[in-house]
Amino acid sequence: MIGVDVVDLERLRPRLRQSRWRRLAFTATETTATEGLSLDAAERRLAMTWAAKEAVVKALRTGFGPSRPPAALSILFELQGPRVATVFAGACSHLHAYHLSCSSTAGVAVAVCQIDQHDCKVGA
């Protein structure tokens, strides 16, 4: 299953600047990872994280919902590339085989996720 998401940073920027939305959308680890970055770099990183979350839920065919809030899906960026750290505890505990790729420019963030195996309960 494949999920793709493209984020227009100008459209997302007002939400990124709302602390309430950031708390609903991102984990503490994801927001902490932007500390020390310029405002532009931090917003690009969060936009790329958001695109990754959207690509993952599209590939899983689950979407976000009350039992699957965005902050319950954690994306970490490591030297080897982006990785899914936490996936909807209880409804989905493992992605057995997946690939996640993310990139951004000054105005756009994009993510592609391919998931071969998972144990997620669609609609859970």
Image (cartoon, rainbow, N blue to C red):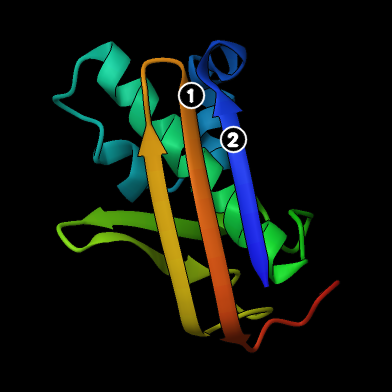
Q: Amino acid at mark 1?
A: Val
Q: Residue furthest right?
A: 123
Q: Secondary structure at mark 2?
A: strand
Nearer to us in this view, 71 or 37: 37
Mark 2 lies on residue: 6
Secondary element under disc 1, as helix, strand or loop, is strand
Nearest the viewer among 103 and 60 is 103
Q: Is residue 95 above or below residue 113?
A: below
Residue 70 image label = none
Report x, y in % for residue 94: 52, 85
Q: Amino acid at mark 2?
A: Val
Which quadrant would residue 31 be assigned to in this image?
top left
Residue 51 horizontal/vertical position (percent): 54, 41
- Say which label, 2 or 1, has the lower sequence index: 2
Are discs 2 and 1 less than 8 Å apart at CB? yes
The image shows residue 50, relative to residue 99, as above or below, that is above
Image point 63% across, 79% down: which residue?
Answer: 92
Dot 1 alpha-carbon crowd within 10 angstroms: few under 14, some 14 to 19, many 20 or more:
some
73 left or right of 36? right
Where's the N terminus, which quadrant?
A: bottom right
